[in-house]
Image: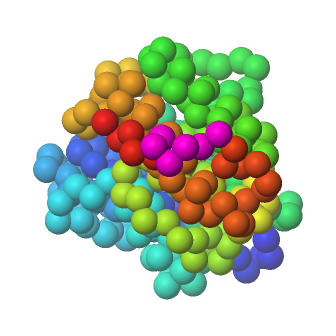
Amino acid sequence: MSKNDRILVGIPVYNEAAFVTEVLQEVLQYTEDVLVIDDGSTDDTARLLSEQPVKIVRHATNRGYGRSTRDMFQWAREDGYEWLITMDCDLQHEPAAIPLFEERIKEGGVDVISGSRYLLECQDGDMPPADRRQINRLMTHEINSRLGLSLTDAFCGFKAYRVDACVDLVMDVDGYDFPMMFWVQAVAAGLAIDELPVRLIYNDPSRSFGGPLDDHARRLRFYQSTLYEEIIRMSSSLPAGADDGLAIGETTCHG
């Protein structure tokens, strides 16, 4: 990163009235370049956002985490930012870690810096529910095995992306399965990936994924379906053997 590189912090929110003011006030201690995607909130989030000196994009209806992330990429490119740091707005990602991402960006040699909640030996706070840990572990292992990566946390939303390297990836999923498509696309594009330890914090173990995805078996099948479909679609650009053992029938198990 050169001294003139610009970094945008992007935060997707959906009904985060309980946290949005606190989170943004802390984020603004580290940067003035903040974009919030209000993904169709129906609570008091919109009013609270209007009181903060941040850029705001509002979806008329809830479009999903993946769509919000894709919108942040597009905004970052159109506004001339070299890097996009994404984080959640539920107090699970500490704004105090933003400078750590900035320091890693300055070191260079990387296109994606992915936060990992499992790199630190000592962690504070509540552990995530068992089903979330299990799905994270299973999917992270499968992503590593099929794509030749060495991730420890495939799902952490606290990330830094080099905009020019990521904005033209062909991603079209709108939901929480976005990371499945992203990792396949990143490997196919030959992006340099690193992980950065972030604290493991879970304030709301009952947090909903929405509808049928609250059933952990369906959620796992949903993630696997997106991963398998994308590996098959991008097979010509992926390491040899990435699609070994994937039957076409396995790609239709959204449930």
User: Looking at the figure, which quarter contains the N terminus?
Assistant: bottom right
Quick one: 175 or 195, which is closer to the camera? Answer: 175
Image x and y of residue 4, in percent = 73, 80
- Magenta-colored span: 245-250
Q: Quadrant of the C terminus?
A: top left
Task: Tell me if residue 49 comes above or below residue 95 in the rendering.
Answer: below
Q: x and y percent of residue 103 in the render?
A: 77, 56
Residue 92 lies in magenta, yes or no?
A: no
With 13 as the anchor, is 86 left or right in this view? right
Q: How many marks?
A: 0
Please tell me whether residue 223 is drawn above or below residue 163 in the rendered image: above
Task: Give the side of residue 13 with respect to residue 5, left or right.
Answer: left
Its colouring scheme is rainbow
Residue 102 visible: no
Residue at left offset 22%, top offset 55%? 62
Q: Magenta stretch: residue 246 in it?
A: yes
Q: Position of residue 49 (x, y in %)?
A: 27, 58
> Which one is nearer the viewer's eye here, 23 or 227?
227
Percent from the top left, x then y, of residue 19?
33, 40
Q: Is residue 110 above or below residue 221?
A: below
Residue 252 seen in render: yes
Residue lying at 38% horizontally and 39% vertically, measured from the top left:
253
The answer to which of 176 and 100 lies nearer the viewer is 176
Instruction: Find residue 36 and report its image quarter.
Output: bottom left
Q: Residue at x 80, y 76 (%)?
A: 2
As displayed, is residue 31 above or below residue 131?
below
Between 171 and 245, the residue placed more toward the observer is 245
Residue 182 vs residue 203: left or right? right
Residue appearing at x 59%, y 27% in the figure: 138
Classify residue 160 by image quadrant. bottom right
